[in-house]
Image (cartoon, helix red, strand yellow):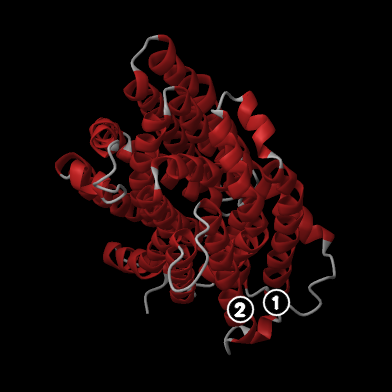
Amino acid sequence: MATPHTLSWRGHLRAVLVLGLPLAGSHLAQIAIGVTDTAMLGWYGVEPLAAGFLGASVFMLLMLVGSGFAWAVIPLVASAAVEGDETRLRRVTRMGMWLSAIYAALVLPLMLWSEVWLLELGQVPSVAADTQAYLRIAGWGMFPALLAMVLKSHLSALEHTRVVLWATLLSALVNAAANWALIFGNWGAPELGLQGAAIASVLSQLGALGALAAWAGLAPRLRPHALFVRLWRPDWAGFGQVFRLGWPIGLTTLAEAGLFFVSASMMGLLGTDMLAAHGIALELAAVSFMVHVGLSQTATVRAGQALGRNDMVGLRRGAIVAAGCSAAFGLLTVSAFLLLPETLIGLFLDADDPMAPHIVTIGVTLLAFAALFQFADAAQVMALGLLRGIQDTRVPMVLAALSYWAVGAPAGYFLGIEAGFGGPGVWSGLVIGLALAAASLTVRFVYRLRAIGASHSTYAPSVG
C-alpha cells in the first residue's frame, strides 16, 4: 500500500470518493428532512409552508451554530487516531457531547418564546404565532440533533462513513412517514398540520441518535474505545480543546447561516408569496450545498490525518482533489437550476393552489441567482473545511463575518428593499457575500499551507 508521501493523484481521488460519497449522501439525507417538511407543508397550504420554512430556518440556524463543537471533533479525532492516542480520541468526543448538550439547553428558550422576537423583526403576526407553535415542539429536537452530529463527526473521522449514511437515511425515512401521517392525518393519525411536521422532525432526530449511539458503542472495531463508559466524568483539558476550536467554527457558521436567515426575514417583508418562493429556491440550493458540505467534511478528515503525519504533499494534493470534486458537482447543479427551474419548483407546490403559478414565476428568477452563487458557496465551504483540518479557525471566522455582514447583508438590504429590486436584489447580496468569502478564505488557506510547508518539521497546530 502506498505511503502517504507517495500516494498518487488517483489514489487521493479514490480516497476522497470512498470517504466523501457516503458523507455527501448522509448530508443529502439530512437535508431531505427539511425538504420533505417543505414539500408536504406546501401541499398542505401556502401559509403553513411559510411558517414552517421560517421555523425550520430558526432551528437550522441555531443548530448550525451549535454544531461548531461537533465539527471541532473531526480534526481532533482524526489526528488522535493517526497518532494512536485512543484516550484523547475518546475524551474529545465526550466533551463535544457535553458542550453540545449545554448549548442546546441555552438556546431552547429562544425557540419556546420565539413569537416576541419574530414580531420585532417585522414578521406578520399570524406567521410569527404559527412559527412559535412549530418551534415549541421542534425545539426539543435540538438535543438529539446536536448529539447525533457529534457522533457523526466521531465516526466520520474514524472513516466509518457508511453507518453515518445509513443512520441518516433511516432518520429521513422516519421523518417522511411521520410527516405523511401527522400533517395530513393519514393511517389513522390525527391531522396536526404544522405541528405534525414538528413532531416528525423530533422523531427522526431521536432515531438517528439511537442508531449512531448503538454503532459507536457496540461495533466490534469501536467497542475498545469505550466511548460511553463514565460519560459523566469531565475531562477539562479535552473540554477546553474542543471549546477553543469549536466556538470560532460555530460563529463562522452563524455568520453564514445568519445571512440566509436575514435574507428570509427580508423576503418576509416583501410578502408571503415571496417568502414561500424564497423557501423553495433555498431548499433546492441547500440540497446541492449538502454535497459540498460532505466533500468539505472529507477535506477536514483528510487534512487532519495529513497534518498528524506531517504529510505536506498529501495535504496539498488532497486539497486540490477535494476542491476539484466540488467544482465538478457544481457544474451539474448549475445546469439543473438553469435548465429545469419550473420542474424543480413544482415539486414543492400543489398545482391546484391558486398562488402556485405566481410562486413558480418568482422562484424561477431566484433559482437563476442560486445558480450564480453555486461555485462561490462551494469554494467557501471547501476552504473552511480545509482550514478546520489544519486547526485554523479564528481568522477564518473574522473573514467570513466581514464578507457576510459587512458586505453581503447590507448589499442585499439595499438592493432588495431600498433600491426596490425585491427578491432578486436580496439574492444579489447573497451572491456578493459568498463570493467575497470564497476569495478571502481560499487566500487564507494558501497562505497557511505555505507557512506549514516552510516549517512542517517543527509545525505545531493552532486555532488560528
In the figure, is residue 19 to the left or right of 90? Answer: left
* Nearer-the-camera pick, 188 or 109: 188
Residue at x-position 29% and y-position 48%: 350
Q: Secondary structure at mark 2?
A: helix
Quarter placement of the N terminus: bottom left
The percent position of residue 70, horizontal first and vertical second, equals 62, 57
How crowded pointer 2 is (Cα within 10 Å; few <14, some 14-19, many 20+) is rated as many
Q: Is residue 77 above or below residue 42?
A: below
Q: Which quarter of the picture shows residue 267? A: top left
* Nearer-the-camera pick, 203 or 93: 203
Circle on res. 237: none
Q: Is residue 401 above or below residue 8?
A: above
Circle on res. 216: 2
In the figure, is residue 252 to the left or right of 101? Answer: left
Q: Is residue 220 above or below residue 161?
A: below
Residue furthest to the top in view is: 419
| Residue at numbered disc 1 | 227
The percent position of residue 15, horizontal first and vertical second, equals 36, 68
Residue at x-position 20% and y-position 42%: 341
The amino acid on which the numbered mark 2 sits, given as a three-letter code, is Ala
Q: Are marks 1 and 2 in contact (CB under 8 Å)?
A: yes
The percent position of residue 198, horizontal first and vertical second, equals 56, 56
Q: Which quarter of the picture shows residue 58? A: top right
The percent position of residue 187, horizontal first and vertical second, equals 44, 73
The amino acid on which the numbered mark 1 sits, given as a three-letter code, is Leu
